[in-house]
Amino acid sequence: MRIKTIVLIIVTILLTVIIMQNTRPITFNILFWQASVSGLVMMAVVAIISLIIGIMIGRPTRVRFDDSHPSMDNPTGKAADTLSDEDRDYIN
């Protein structure tokens, strides 16, 4: 097993134990609204929201390449013409 998997399992177990120990009701205020929710539910909701935010922030972005700019593969910056004259004659 990879170290990342082991750490994830340990964190999940610890989070589950902590959530299960905190089942008493918690009262909290949101602006002018007051709510009383079980600590278990509140911690689970916060953990799920944190997971979703972590996934959204941590996922890699796609890099889109534009052939119109010079690069190592295309030093002139012109679009590459991949068809030969023979291929063009065959298509037409």
Image (tube, rainbow, N blue to C red):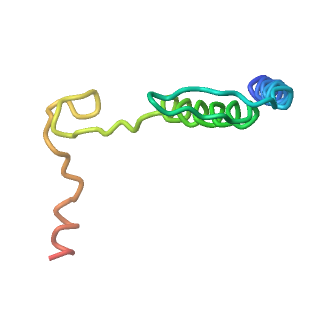
Q: In this view, does 27 lie to the left or right of 16?
A: left
Q: Residue 45, located in which quarter of the rendered image? A: top right
User: Considering depth in this image, is 66 or 24 the residue closer to the camera?
Assistant: 24
Q: In this view, does 10 lie to the left or right of 91?
A: right
Locate the N terminus and report the quarter of the image it occupies: top right
Q: Is residue 71 left or right of residue 20?
A: left
User: Considering depth in this image, is 92 or 31 the residue closer to the camera?
Assistant: 31
Residue in the picture at 56% in, 37% down:
52
Q: In this view, does 28 lie to the left or right of 60?
A: right
Instruction: Work out whether 23 lies above or below 88.
Output: above
Q: Residue 16, located in which quarter of the rendered image? A: top right
Residue in the picture at 81% in, 31% down:
23
Q: Residue 55, located in which quarter of the rendered image? A: top right
User: Considering depth in this image, is 59 or 50 the residue closer to the camera?
Assistant: 50
User: Considering depth in this image, is 30 or 6 the residue closer to the camera?
Assistant: 30
Residue 6 in the image, given as x and y percentages of width and height? 82, 26
Residue 85 in the image, given as x and y percentages of width and height? 16, 62
Residue 42 in the image, given as x and y percentages of width and height? 67, 33
Residue in the picture at 78% in, 27% down:
15
The number of discs equals 0
Locate the C terminus and report the quarter of the image it occupies: bottom left
Residue in the picture at 24% in, 53% down:
82
Residue 49 in the image, given as x and y percentages of width and height? 58, 35
